[in-house]
Image: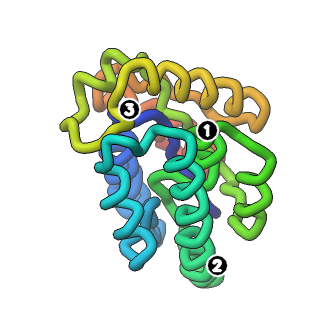
Amino acid sequence: MYICLEGIDGSGKSTQVEMLINWLKKCGIEVFRVFEPTDSPAGRLIRNMLRNPNATNENFQKTLALLFAADRIILMDKITEAEKKSKIVVSDRCFYSSLVYQNGADWIAEINKFAKKPDIVLLMDIDPETAISRCEGKDSFEDIDFLIKIRERYLDLAEKEDFMVVNAKNGLNKVHDDIKRVMARKLGMCI
């Protein structure tokens, strides 16, 4: 099974990924963690580029979309291998981020056609003002106007793709409990 947590910057994805993995391990489930961008050479280049003040402009976004697609192709082999070993794959972002951040153009879907679609997507939904207050100010995506657009795109995509939407503004433990309830239902487990 391939599970992905998505959401705008500052929504708590990385924290909740870590908490989900710890809970699954305590339940005796083998887990393989992935994140995007990865730590491959393409992923490291992406991380550096995300710090550029022009990272939100259209041409820069096109370049990032291509790099993310390349980075994802590398990642697909690791996901497939983990699933063959009956591990649950938990990801901090997936190709849905590109659809949302690079504005869902048809060519974005085309260059990501080799990316595996997650079995479950949990959208960490939060208002941009709260999200920005949680951010460390490391990249250009931490802009209120930009995040308002991104959140709207995520919510539209969540409706089309049937994501599980989690209120990420709730306290850390409440959000984790909400995620555990969703996952327990999907995995046929008791909490």
Q: Tell me the crowding category of disc 2: few under 14, some 14 to 19, or many 20 or more residues within 10 angstroms, Cα based.
A: some
Q: Which mark is residue 100?
A: 1
Image quadrant in which you'd find residue 66? bottom right
Residue beneath label 3, please? 11
- Residue drawn at (41%, 33%), measured in percent from left and top? 177
Q: Earlier in the sequence, mark 1 or mark 3?
A: 3
Closer to the eye: label 1 or 2: 1
Residue 176 can be seen, yes or no: no
Q: Is residue 125 left or right of residue 73?
A: left
Q: Which mark is residue 80?
A: 2
Q: Tell me the crowding category of disc 1: few under 14, some 14 to 19, or many 20 or more residues within 10 angstroms, Cα based.
A: many
- Residue drawn at (52%, 36%), measured in percent from left and top? 181
- Residue drawn at (49%, 59%), measured in percent from left and top? 90
Q: How is the image coloured?
A: rainbow
- Against 183, residue 178 (above or below) is above
Closer to the eye: label 1 or 3: 1
Q: Nearer the viewer, residue 54 or 181?
A: 54
Callout 1 secondary element: helix
